[in-house]
Image (cartoon, coloured by chain):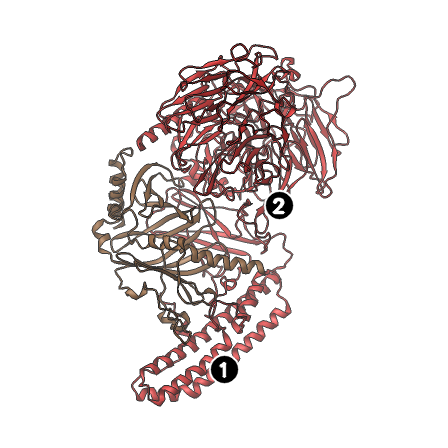
Amino acid sequence: MLRRLLTFAGILLFTTPLFAQTADDIIAKFVKTVGGMEKIKAVTTLRRVGKYSRAGGFEAKITQENKRPDKVRQDFMLQGMDGITAWDGKTGWKIEPWDGKKDPEPLGEEELKSIIEDSDLDGPLVNYRQKGNKVEYVGMEPVEGTDAYKLKVTLASGDTRYYYMDTDYYVPIKIESTLIIRGAERTYESSLGDYKEVAGWYLPFSIEVNTKGSPNRQKYTYERIEANVPIAEERFKKPSLPTNDGKPMAPDAADKQPEQQQKKEEKKPPVAALQHVASQEEVRGSVR
Amino acid sequence: MINMMTTRTAVVAASLTCLLALPSVAQPQPPPASTSAAVRVDSDTISGLGSRNIGSAAMSGRIAAIDAVHEGDRLTLFIGSASGGLWKSVNGGTTYRSIFDKQPVMSIGAVTIDPTNPKTIWVGSGETWTRNSVSVGNGVYRSQDGGDNWANVGLQGSERIAKIVVNPTDSKTVYACATGPLWSDSDQRGVYKTTDGGTTWVKVLAGANGSSGCSMLAMDSQNPGTLFAGMWDFRRKGWTFRSGGEGAGAPSGSGLFKTTDGGATWKALDSKNAGGLPARPWGRVAVTIAPSKPSVVYALIEAEPPANGLYRSDDGGNTWQLRDRSQGMVWRPFYFANLIVDPRNEEKIYKGGGSLIASNDGGKSFSDITGGGHGDYHAVWIDPKDTDRLIAGDDGGLWYSYDGGNRWWKADNLPVSQFYHVSVDMERPYRVYGGLQDNSSWVGDSQYPGGITNSRWENMYGGDGFWMFPDPTDPDYLYAEAQGGEIGRVNRKTHETRGLKPLPGYNEGKLRFNWNTPIHVSPKGTVYLGAQFLFRSSDHGQTWDRISPDLTTNDPTKQRQEQSGGITVDNSAAEMHTTIYAICESPKNSSVLWVGTDDGNLQLSRDAGKSWTNVVANIAGLPKNAWVSSIDAGHFDEGTAYATFDLHTFGDMKPFAYRTSDFGKSWIPVVGQGGPVRGYAHVIKEDLVNRDLLFLGTEFGLWISLDGGKQWAQYKGNDLPSVAVRDLAIHPRDHDLVIATHGRGIWIVDDITPLRALTTEALNKEVLFVDSKPTVQRITASGGWVNGDAQFVGANPTSDAVITYYQKKRHIFGDLKIEVLDSDGKVIGTIPSGKRRGLNRVQWSMRVGPPRVPTAASADFSANRGPRVPPGTYTVRMTKDKSVYTTALQVISDPRSKHTAGDRKAQFDLAMKLYRQLGEMSFAVDRINNVRLALDDRASKVPADDPLVARLRNASAQVDELRRKIVATKEGGMITGEERLREYLTALYSDVLQYDGQPSHTQVERSEALGRELGDVVKDFDSWTSKQLASINTSLASKKLPLIEPLTKEQWEKPIEN
């Protein structure tokens, strides 16, 4: 399949004049290259499983589960604890168990924006008009030595993303995301790679994210991505509040048999959860 | 629209090439690269070798222009730096982002926010505060998205722009005040107008001659067809500067002009038709209109004293009155000619200068309001909503006042420092030394626990700073200098300073020291200093030997600095000429000395200064009198040397660099014309190990050649912009490249070893591991403290191991996996791989994966990493699709560390023991939980009235008691203070991990005690299961419920199915 794909892309390379690009051309080629609309449409759920790591040897297991039309759940696992951020299409919630508080909490503005964006199973480019996104081709701009088409994507939320599409294969190799949080901009860069086939659809298995200008990269490496696995609706639903005996209804990793542990990963960082983890670590570090 | 932008960009690129490729004497070209080795070597081949900016923002640097706007209740700022690009803050200055870094120039002359659309930003590139060291621009830029994306929209040849004004009722009508080239005649100057948002420009006001351009422009915001323009006749040469005509009373093209029809016609205002204006000739002219009352116009006119000063008109320019002409008003008008009127009060006016001065009486008198600021003010912004709120830019950075200028806050987050030179010492970690434009000479740390904050830089001298060196013979001392050869030797602890400048003898006349006087310190501590003669001292400056005759052209026509300045004499040593500018002693033979002068001589002595030969005539094609900007004597043989030449003071911005291999008898160019290198050359350095590896700093960035100068590529690692690279140092021990930028502080490329390995053969490989220096396991340490968001903090090198590889193409599809193996071939780490084309750097933490930590009420992040592996040789294995590559990774201990290998082993062994204990503990807790949850599960499946339910619940409670001995279980997100075995063990574990040396007896004993205590609980659980579980299982079996079996180690160790 890969060979077929490369051949196909090679033909595109030699037959398409570089100067006559439009956003629609590029997106159409992207969709074709990664497997075609039929293959994408045929995927109703995705479960990504992998590892989060950053400098200094910090690691965690991560999963992300997506279910059409717009449900997503991201889990960040550490020491048998399960940090969750989820969106069930209507409500966003999280559990940050790290200090022993295991009841669900509402998401902050930044987290909510991120999770809603992540609930788009096939990303903002595919069927972008139906999703209310606007896409504009703004020219060529190299990414780390590789020529790329730069697409300006204005999401339905009003936030802007820049997608840098490889000129040979038309897949995104970098995404620049500016989130407007409480009126202030935060810009993140994501580098995408290790595209591999999942049910006929090529998806990136490696994503590195950094705050723009920072050399510190957070890395997401998926060991596997599964398509069309059954994922129960309850996974996305906000759990009820703790019962009278004080026992939370949320999944408690301690109350799970190890064999049953199920974790999910995300394609983008659950930024707030990670910042929380990072700040915990740093605060403890400095107190020492 | 998009296509138009693209086309325009192409046009800009083409024009820029033209601009920089002014015709000059034809030069021989370097031999072309062999066609068989046609590997693309460009920016991206080499820039994966990242860099880091260590600042500092302590001294910051010159700010040339400011604009700001309230977006809602927030204040958005745009800060134009003299040579470090444009910076934006969306939070009133708490944080800044550099937003001009992808542009080919870094000098900002003007920045203007469209008054009707705050997302449209106009930038005039090229500063007009035309001091000797000023950078250059290339036209007008426009952004329509608040500064994220820029298009160069014209006037590419204007070199510098003083002001842009946008019609407040028509965003498409914009005027640019093009001051024009400083060093040469040009007609690309004057007032330009666009009525189509920048697509086309029309010159609406031309200068009177080839050296007169626009120095200031003001629009009547209530009547936008009315504008005033100051025109300025000026020229700088290497040895002189004039503001006005050729001499104090000579005719000048300077003037003051007014239009009332949007520039279609202009009236020249002078003493004849506008009563009260001074008689010509004039020098620099500034003009501004009071926003609150546009009939009030102020003009600063550099006229012949006593007519120079501030003029005011109350009738829209028809008649004028001379107001203030205090020292602060008339001092150095070429450098300070900006008037800012309070937007609400036409009587209140500010003017930059050596001090910032303010008037409350319509310009009759001024007070100094500099307060604690640096001095040399160029720009002021006044908040129209709160006119007590000021933002001012000077040679030392940016300042905020909230009380009308009485007191000032410094911006500590703008690392736009303007270094001239850099050197390093041999401390561990090494320190960085350098002097800056108007900001003294500083020593900074190349790394420090917690990051290189502004406080990790220390000022050691005064004045403008240039060359600075540690004294290699006495670590307590260093050499620094101020402008004009004011060299001193400084005790770095007490800061006691001894002035060492050589002085003239009897009736000798002047020793001519350049503004940026060269100092060279040999590894043995011999100090060289250049005037027109070369001085040498071997006793720390106690005595100077004059070891040369006058090595310059000694051209008397270039020695008239006392007349320099034009209308206003300005003889600051900045124009001192016919001086020595570059000195280099051969590292191979200390008798071989090279000297270059600012007037075009390249002198060689092979006998330690007894005799000298001027070899510059041997350089075919080099224009005469080219400034020798640097010399680097070869590191491999004494006959080799490199030299850069700078002709920008003649208006030629091209790079010139040459190499000789025969003591200067013949030279070949190492920078070909028509190649990618842009900008006049400041410095060239030959690598210390690979003689084909060359580094070239120009006004527009850092360029690297892997093949002795045949091909060059701009280095852009970690987004190093096209900023002037004035000097470079290669650390001889650590192999770092230290980059002195004039506008963005110091940058470091950690470990350039991989560049040395990029031979043609290597570049042709699809994938290749590239050698790096051995990885040092840096001492684990923390430092610094919380600084808020408004502080610059320079990055440290990573504390991880760095693995470098090269890829011919970007990796997009399939696996690219990198693993680290120990000496037994066991995989001990997996590293996310870099995908980029060219050099990639990836990091390995050198740690075993995190231990399994028992689940408890809260997470323990300090235990979420494994012990650091001991020093030794590891194997790195890369799998790219089906190909496998390996390399060795040397890990060594920190040379500063006093721990023996035995100490380290003891630490690692104890850490691993605790690591295993955490695993055992996790197993124990999981076993207990497994049984506990199974008991609860069975209880839920038995009818509620069955006595077995109570029995099962009771058993569950019993085993949970055991669990609670191991882990804290109180939940709820509070500080419960609950500590159990897990909390004790993780605390011990992270303490042991933190210190690489021998663990204390207490720690060893504690590990044993905790091990036994855990063993006790496990024993209790085993005893409970053997006593209770069999009979419970019998009951379960009778009800056909599944039996309960404790987890076995094998089951537990099975990888968790995610």
* Tag 1 subunit: B
Residue B740 image point, x, y percent? 56, 36
Please give left or right for residue B179 compared with residue B247 in the image: left
Closer-to-camera residue (B935/B311): B311
Is the C-beta separation of discs 2 and 1 under 8 Å?
no
Q: On the image, numbered disc 1 is attached to which residue? A: B1019
- What color is chain A drawn in? brown
Determine the secondary structure under disc 2: helix
Q: Residue at x 32, y 43 (%)?
A: A153
Tell how many labels.
2
Q: Which of pointers 2 and 1 lies earlier in the amino acid sequence?
A: 2
Residue found at the very far right of the displayed protein: B506
CA distance for labels 2 and 1: 56 Å
Q: Which amino acid does label 1 sit on?
A: Lys
A234 to A219, vertically: above or below = below
Residue B986 image point, x, y percent? 53, 68
Q: Residue at x 51, y 29 (%)?
A: B699
* Residues at discs 2 and 1 both on one chain: yes
B330 to A23, vertically: above or below = above
Please give left or right for residue B723 compared with residue A259 in the image: right
* Tag 2 subunit: B
Q: Is residue B830 visible?
A: no
Closer-to-camera residue (B205/B932): B205
B202 to A52, vertically: above or below = above
Residue A159 image point, x, y percent? 36, 46
- What color is chain B drawn in? red
Q: On the image, numbered disc 2 is attached to which residue? A: B455
Res B223 quadrant in image? top left
